[in-house]
Amino acid sequence: IAFAIKRKKEKIDLPNVVLSETKAIYKKEYQLGLWAIKLIKEKIGIQLEEAEAGYIALHLVNFSTKNSSQNIMQGYQHILNF
């Protein structure tokens, strides 16, 4: 997220070529990504692109495949407490 904000401030566009696949395959994670970019807008006033929601979703998927269910829940709780 920090790099996404930095890219936005520096006006660097990073197209997400797998966004449509991410939306279709990882629906819940993508919804969390959308929620995260909305929260970022509310908290710090920076509007990230929809592509960033896809990147956030993929990070969540990557995290979940590397950790146990307990760690997944802790990760989601951490995100929700942002």
Image (cartoon, rainbow, N blue to C red):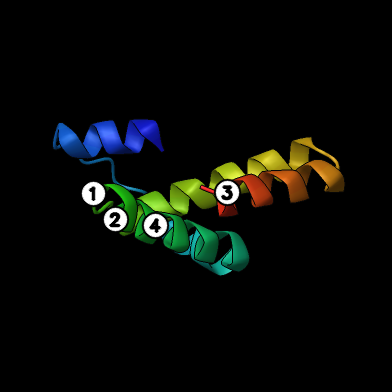
Whether the residues at callouts 4 and 2 have beta carbons within 8 Å, the answer is yes
Q: CA distance from mark 4 to mark 3?
A: 10 Å
Marked residue nearer the N-terminal end (4 or 3): 4
Label 3 vs 1, first from the N-terminus: 1
Disc 2 secondary structure class: helix
Q: Quadrant of the N terminus?
A: top left
Instruction: Tell me the residue at 35%/53% (across/down).
Output: 51
Q: Earlier in the sequence, mark 1 or mark 2?
A: 2
Residue at mark 2: 41
**Amino acid residing under circle 4:** Leu
Task: Give how far across and how far down residue 21 sits, in percent.
Answer: 51, 61
The total of numbered circles placed on residues is 4
The extreme left residue here reads 11
The x, y position of residue 53, in whole percent, is 42, 55
**Alpha carbon distance from label 2 to label 3:** 15 Å
Q: Which residue is mark 1?
A: 46
Place residue 39 in its image quadrant: bottom left
Name the amino acid type tagged 2.
Lys
Q: CA distance from mark 1 to mark 2?
A: 5 Å
Asked whether the residues under the numbered discs 2 and 3 touch, taking CB atoms below 8 Å apart as contact, a structural biologist would say no
